[in-house]
Image (spheres, rainbow, N blue to C red):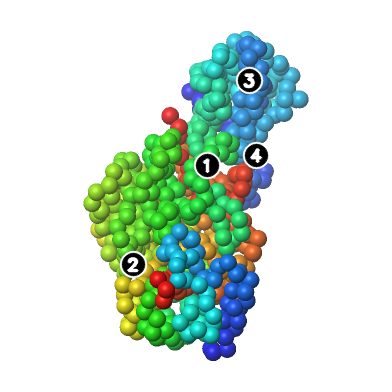
């Protein structure tokens, strides 16, 4: 298969990388993912400026190709062969590719594209080539949409290239909802905001008159659940992203509710509700109605997250004496503890691929983002800092975003992302401080 | 332990002096329970029925050990004094805020703050304060009072704070 050819190229590049040898691959599992440490030599790709098929497309053609590069290089799996090094000059999208020119500069992958603009509409075409096999990798693709959405089309091109080369699911055409933070630590002003996964196109969804916490997307990405102090104490809300209209889901007196998350059915909401100082896990319909109690221990039970098949819920509880992670059937029932290492474990989140649970771990005064198998085995810590908290999965289950807060009176929160492997730790740009990120599903 | 409490009260008085438009300086979340409502003023600390007296002479907060919501001896002593004062000043309504330090995850700290507020409230009720006068709210780690990242600050942030409203004129 054509796809395999270049995928082999990637694996080859990883295997041959001298830096890999020391800290190298994990003992078992698929080669390209199971890297626990160290630097991998990224796959060299060339992305010449996309061809502008008419005068109106000139700026967008360049900008779109830059975003494609930014996505691919930002994944940590690719590096760009700089344009100054290019020998061939792509001016016609349909002209035959001169593979020798790209081999000569050691580009293993080549992405070409063409952009045309008609009024408010933009059409983007792209092709991917496996340079060392002298072949295209998959068919050419075409995306069309409003010029306002040009970045999404760039992300779709990059997603297609990323998926074909790595065999992983796409994730660039996605958004992140988070809490934008301003002001000193003791009086933080918090607003809900949403942005592209790479920090572009920030939009605010609430003002800062009430503390807001822990937003989570619906499985279709059109709604957000979150916790707000709008009534004076924490309550869960549902917000429609397009209209920014919101409504409280749980307003029973003498209770508080927090930590909401959608079930994969897009209707059921699982959350923590507290009465008389005791937090348990409940479900209800996002449309309202009766609540169902899933846990009844005197412990703090919170942070619930569904498995992608909707059959199980992972959550945290201090029923053993300190915070640990438990899994129970989605309808309630005997929870099974899965975390057994040293320290405290919280904020478990089931990967959209179903294979891992990400969590926050606190141990010896440090915070870590980690992953473990759904039975608690193969625990692996990906980060370490004064305060790392609240992992959220990219739609492909390959990348994790979280918040990092620095210490001291002037400490601030920022968003970071890291690969499932622990590689490619980097800050996600936001205009102000930021916390509680939640990744959307892939956009449709 | 007494000296310790005194230190807090001194710190508290300084906070009050620096914050003249906000007599009830321990409180947060401006839109609840009419902190600026009629009848609430700091009054004079010489007036034993005033909020100022309560704040300065008794104290508005109890502190907790790391990751604990069980009241310690100092906490119970202070709450008993608060209860006695509240029983002599029945016009005041009480909001008990529960807080946590930053060493913990957000949702867990909300629940922990809730436990602390509930523990303080329960103790006040056990000392005869009418339950209908008492409500609770948790702020988790959202509103630290002291903002260094050392135990000196953390110990002040693990707290339950009494916010008074109403009073003799309402």
Please, what secondary structure does the residue beneath circle 3 have? helix
- Pick out the residue farthest to the bottom: B2
Nearer to me, A111 or A9: A111
Nearer to me, A437 or A68: A437
Give the Cα separation between the discs numbered 4 and 3. 29 Å
Please, what secondary structure does the residue beneath circle 1 have? strand
Subunit ID for the residue under disc 2: A
Do callouts 1 and 4 point to residues on the same chain?
A: yes
Q: Quadrant of the C terminus of chain A?
A: top left
Say which of marks 1 and 4 sits in front. 1
Do callouts 2 and 4 point to residues on the same chain?
A: yes
Q: Which residue matches tag 2?
A: A278
Q: Which residue matches tag 4?
A: A41
- Who comes first in sequence, dot 1 or dot 4? 4
Nearer to me, A48 or B170: B170
Q: Residues within 10 Å of mark 4 (few under 14, many from 20)?
A: some
Give the Cα separation between the discs numbered 1 and 4. 38 Å
Subunit ID for the residue under disc 1: A
- Who comes first in sequence, dot 2 or dot 3? 3
The residue at 57%/52% (across/down) is A181
Using the image, tell me which numbered label, if any, was put on residue A61. 3
């Amino acid at each position: 298969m054509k796809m395999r050819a270049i995928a082999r190229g990637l694996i080859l590049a990883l295997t041959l990388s001298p830096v890999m040898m020391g800290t190298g691959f994990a003992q078992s599992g698929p080669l390209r993912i199971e890297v626990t440490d160290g630097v991998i030599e990224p796959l060299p790709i060339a992305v010449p400026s996309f061809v502008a098929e008419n005068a109106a497309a000139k700026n967008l053609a360049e900008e779109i190709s830059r975003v494609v590069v930014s996505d691919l290089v930002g994944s940590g799996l690719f590096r760009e062969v700089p344009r100054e090094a290019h020998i061939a000059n792509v001016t016609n999208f349909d002209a035959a590719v001169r593979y020798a020119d790209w081999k000569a500069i050691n580009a293993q992958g080549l992405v070409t594209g063409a952009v045309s603009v008609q009024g408010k509409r933009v059409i983007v075409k792209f092709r991917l080539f496996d340079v060392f096999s002298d072949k295209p990798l998959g068919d050419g693709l075409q995306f069309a949409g409003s010029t306002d959405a040009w970045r999404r089309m760039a992300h779709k091109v990059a997603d297609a290239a990323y998926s074909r080369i790595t065999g992983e699911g796409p994730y660039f055409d996605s958004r992140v909802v988070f809490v934008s933070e301003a002001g000193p630590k003791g009086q933080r002003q918090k607003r809900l905001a949403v942005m592209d996964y790479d920090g572009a196109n920030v939009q605010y969804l609430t003002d800062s008159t009430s503390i807001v916490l822990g937003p989570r997307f619906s499985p279709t990405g059109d709604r957000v659940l979150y916790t707000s102090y709008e009534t004076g104490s924490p309550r869960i809300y549902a917000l429609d992203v397009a209209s920014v209209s919101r409504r409280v889901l749980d307003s029973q007196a003498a209770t508080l509710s927090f930590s909401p998350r959608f079930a994969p059915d897009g209707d059921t909401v699982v959350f923590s509700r507290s009465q008389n100082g005791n937090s348990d896990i409940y479900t209800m319909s996002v449309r309202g109605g009766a609540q169902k109690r899933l846990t009844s221990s005197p412990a703090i039970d919170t942070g619930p997250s569904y498995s992608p098949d909707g059959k199980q819920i992972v959550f945290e509880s201090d029923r053993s004496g300190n915070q640990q992670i438990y899994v129970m059937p989605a309808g309630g029932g005997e929870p099974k503890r899965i975390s057994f290492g040293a320290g405290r474990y919280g904020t478990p989140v089931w990967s959209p691929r179903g294979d891992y649970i990400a969590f926050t771990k606190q141990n010896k005064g440090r915070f870590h983002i980690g992953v473990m198998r759904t039975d608690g085995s193969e625990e692996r810590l990906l980060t370490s800092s004064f305060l790392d908290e609240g992992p959220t999965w990219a739609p492909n289950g390959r990348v994790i975003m979280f918040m990092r807060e620095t210490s001291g009176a002037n400490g601030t929160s920022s968003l970071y992302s890291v690969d499932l492997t622990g590689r490619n730790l980097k800050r996600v740009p936001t205009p102000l401080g930021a916390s509680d990120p939640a990744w959307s599903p892939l956009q449709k | 332990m007494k000296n310790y409490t005194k230190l807090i009260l001194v710190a508290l008085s300084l906070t009050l002096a620096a914050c003249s438009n906000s007599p009830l300086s321990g409180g947060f979340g401006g839109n609840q329970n009419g902190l600026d409502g009629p009848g609430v003023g700091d009054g004079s600390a010489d007036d034993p029925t005033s909020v100022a007296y309560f704040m300065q002479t008794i104290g508005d907060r109890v502190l907790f050990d790391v990751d604990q919501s069980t009241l310690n001896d100092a906490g119970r002593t202070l709450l008993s004094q608060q209860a006695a004062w509240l029983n002599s000043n029945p016009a005041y309504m009480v909001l008990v805020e529960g807080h946590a330090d930053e060493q913990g995850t957000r949702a867990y700290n909300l629940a922990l703050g809730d436990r602390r507020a509930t523990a303080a409230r329960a103790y006040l009720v056990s000392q005869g304060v009418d339950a209908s006068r008492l409500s609770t709210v948790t702020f988790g780690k959202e509103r630290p009072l002291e903002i260094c990242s050392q135990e000196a600050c953390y110990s002040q942030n693990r707290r339950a704070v009494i916010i008074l409203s109403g009073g003799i004129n309402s």
